[in-house]
Image (cartoon, rainbow, N blue to C red):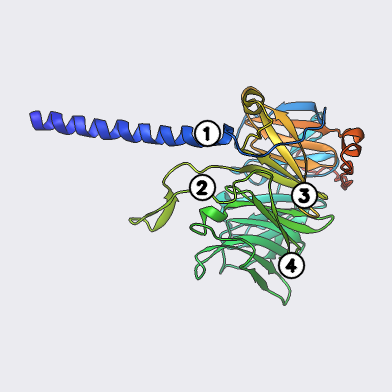
């Protein structure tokens, strides 16, 4: 009986010690975000104006794309249903995406991307891409390569796809381009730079901009991003304004499964990002030295960089909504649309010319986007 009691106390002690250790590591990572990080930000006055807020009643959504008039939202658990709203959220409906009956896809691994006038469906396991018009949402296969899988992929033309995949020889993530023409596949193993394990240390966000055409990749755990042309030729490597040049991660290999996991919570540098025209928008996880902790903790800060050369331009805030921060966002013309928990929020971007003139900078100008017509189907408001 004494032995059983001693064993129970030992197990209990190990359990509480484990919980305490994880809690300590979490607060240390949070403290790093709020501590002195040796950089400052520039804030023009009155950059954003909240336009509309819509309750989607579900957190499991992502922004698939948009035009100068509409934004398109998808539920990953129901990827064939496209939710559509104009920028004022007064015209809202849903439309069904149709794919050929014989098409075999991993339905829970599908990603929808809207690049007007087209809508794309991407299945990463077999690198299959289906494409159709926004006017009828009838999708047919346009790219397929069952011998390669991807963890992220974006269409860069009607016949080509840029994706992030794992190279077993190099033991790291790389960027690759697939096409349907004779060029086939292009490897770009030198774009993403390995620091620790090649997987978590190169984790990040892949973006494509149509006008001007370029591909951008923003790392999660270090102050770096890269910009290439659509053939994956490196244009330049850039740095965000903080000083975290090395990914602060602790990967550990799980021998029983042969997989790699995190031994401690990673320190995020860049939480989410997007591109629009000549501008790169990055939601930073780190407080600048000229920001008050209370101000920073109650909002999401967006840093803006020139996509032409990677130079930092300015920053602005998006306020928390009922305590919820920005989880993802896109910029369409002068409209920024953000997901904050189950809320979809449209902000109007306004940049005072005097702020930029005083600093010898050019006031941001965003490209006009094509207006897509409604995707006609059995439209159901949401």
Whole-angstrom CA distance, mark 1 to mark 3, is 27 Å
Q: Earlier in the sequence, mark 3 or mark 4?
A: 4
Total numbered labels = 4
The disc at residue 163 is: none
Disc 2: which residue: 248
The disc at residue 231 is: 4
Q: Which quarter of the image is occupied by the C terminus?
A: top right
* Rendering coords of residue 260 (x, y %): 43, 54
Check contact, mark 2 vs mark 4: CB within 8 A.
Answer: no
Query: Mark 1, residues whose alpha carbon is within 10 Å: few (<14), some, or many (≥20)?
Result: some
Q: Earlier in the sequence, mark 3 or mark 2?
A: 2
Disc 3: which residue: 311
Q: Is residue 96 above or below residue 254?
A: above
**Residue furthest to the left:** 1
Q: Is residue 338 or residue 141 the one in the foreground? A: 338
Query: Mark 4, residues whose alpha carbon is within 10 Å: few (<14), some, or many (≥20)?
Result: some
Whole-angstrom CA distance, mark 3 to mark 4, is 23 Å
Is residue 329 at least partly visible in the picture?
Answer: yes
> In the image, what residue occupies the spot 77% across and 58% down?
214
Q: Earlier in the sequence, mark 1 or mark 3?
A: 1
């Amino acid at each position: 009986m004494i032995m059983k009691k001693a064993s129970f106390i030992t197990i209990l002690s190990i359990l509480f010690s484990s919980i305490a250790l994880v809690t300590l590591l979490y607060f240390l990572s949070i403290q790093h975000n709020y501590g002195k990080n040796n950089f400052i930000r520039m804030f023009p006055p009155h950059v954003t104006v909240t336009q509309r807020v819509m309750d989607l009643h579900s957190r499991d959504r992502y922004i698939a794309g948009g035009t100068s008039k509409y934004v398109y939202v998808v539920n990953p658990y129901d990827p064939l249903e496209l939710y559509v709203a104009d920028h004022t959220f007064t015209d809202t409906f849903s439309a069904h995406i149709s794919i050929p009956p014989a098409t075999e896809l991993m339905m829970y691994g599908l990603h929808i991307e809207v690049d007007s006038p087209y809508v794309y469906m991407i299945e990463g396991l077999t690198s299959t891409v289906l494409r159709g018009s926004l006017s009828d949402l009838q999708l047919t296969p346009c790219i397929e390569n069952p011998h390669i899988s991807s963890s992220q992929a974006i269409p860069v033309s009607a016949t080509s796809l840029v994706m992030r995949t794992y190279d077993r020889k190099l033991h790291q993530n790389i960027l690759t381009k697939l096409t349907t023409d004779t060029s086939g596949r292009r490897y770009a193993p030198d774009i993403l730079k390995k620091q620790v394990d090649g997987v978590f240390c190169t984790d990040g966000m892949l973006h494509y901009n149509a006008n001007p055409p370029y591909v951008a990749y923003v790392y999660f755990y270090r102050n770096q991003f890269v910009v290439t042309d659509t053939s994956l030729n490196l244009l330049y490597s850039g740095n965000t304004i903080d000083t975290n040049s090395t990914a602060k991660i602790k990967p550990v290999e799980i021998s029983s499964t042969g997989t790699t996991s995190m031994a401690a919570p990673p320190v995020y540098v860049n939480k989410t990002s997007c591109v629009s025209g000549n501008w790169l928008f990055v939601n930073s996880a780190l407080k600048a030295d000229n920001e008050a902790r209370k101000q920073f903790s109650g909002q999401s800060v967006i840093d803006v960089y020139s996509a032409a050369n990677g130079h930092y331009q300015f920053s602005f805030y998006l306020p928390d909504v009922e305590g919820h921060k920005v989880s993802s966002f896109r910029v369409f013309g002068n409209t920024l649309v953000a997901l904050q928990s189950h809320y979809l929020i449209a902000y109007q971007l306004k940049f005072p010319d005097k702020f930029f003139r005083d600093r010898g900078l050019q006031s941001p100008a965003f490209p006009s986007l094509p207006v897509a017509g409604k995707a006609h189907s059995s439209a159901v408001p949401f």
